[in-house]
Image: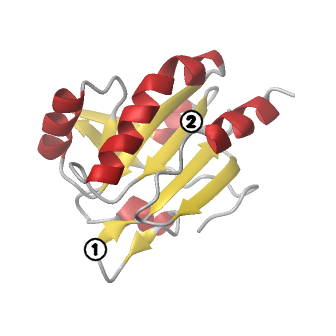
């Protein structure tokens, strides 16, 4: 897993069937990457719902959040619509897990992303990272602490 102080690997992933997001286009903003195993799983559903509730707090810290899993853009679209998510879910679908691998959070055995969080500063450096157990919702406290430290 990449550690703080590392330059965040750039990527471009589908945020919808016809929309792509490129990390380097977000320079000047803080970015939260929430890697998670799969849409529709109970823990992932709770985790993404929590972040949906927290988006206004993230915005106060000039931060945007993105969920990333190996599910496809159509699956993400259905999941986001069902859960009424107000932030993009990015499809690390093909080549499968390429971005998760670049960040060191791909589970080769299961073929999914591990549950990992990264806060990337305005210059594109990883400011904070966290790896959680697959069955544990990591919450948002670590993210908020990292964002507050970036403002000091």
Disc on res. 103: none
* Left or right: residue 148 compared with residue 115: right
Question: Residue 25, image x and y in percent?
Answer: 50, 32
Label 2 belongs to which residue? 31
Quadrant into which the C terminus falls? top right
The alpha-carbon separation of the residues under discs 2 and 1 comes to 25 Å
* Quadrant of res 20: top left
Contact (Cβ within 8 Å) of mark 2 with mark 1: no
Asked which secondary structure carries label 2, the reply is: strand
Quadrant into which the N terminus falls? bottom right
Label 1 belongs to which residue? 111
* Left or right: residue 136 compared with residue 127: left
* Left or right: residue 105 compared with residue 42: right
Closer to viewer: mark 2 or mark 1: 1
Vertical relation: 102 (above or below) 32: below
Question: Residue 136, image x and y in percent?
Answer: 46, 58
Vertical relation: 148 (above or below) 135: above
Residue displayed at 17% across by 35% down: 77
Question: Residue 100, image x and y in percent?
Answer: 42, 62
Asked which secondary structure carries label 1, the reply is: loop
């Amino acid at each position: 897993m990449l550690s703080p102080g590392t330059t965040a690997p750039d990527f471009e992933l589908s945020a919808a069937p016809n929309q792509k997001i490129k990390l380097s286009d977000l320079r000047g903003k803080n970015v939260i990457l929430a890697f998670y195993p799969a849409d529709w799983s109970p823990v992932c559903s709770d985790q993404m719902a929590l972040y949906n509730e927290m988006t206004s707090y993230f915005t106060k810290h000039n931060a945007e959040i993105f969920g990333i899993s190996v599910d496809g853009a159509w699956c993400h679209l259905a999941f986001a619509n069902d859960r009424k998510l107000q932030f993009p879910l990015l499809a690390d679908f093909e080549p499968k897990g390429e971005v998760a691998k670049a960040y060191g959070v791909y589970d080769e055995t299961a073929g999914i992303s591990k549950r990992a969080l990264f806060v990337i500063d305005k210059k594109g450096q990883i400011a904070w990272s966290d790896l959680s157990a697959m069955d544990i919702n990591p919450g948002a406290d670590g993210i908020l602490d990292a964002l507050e430290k970036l403002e000091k």
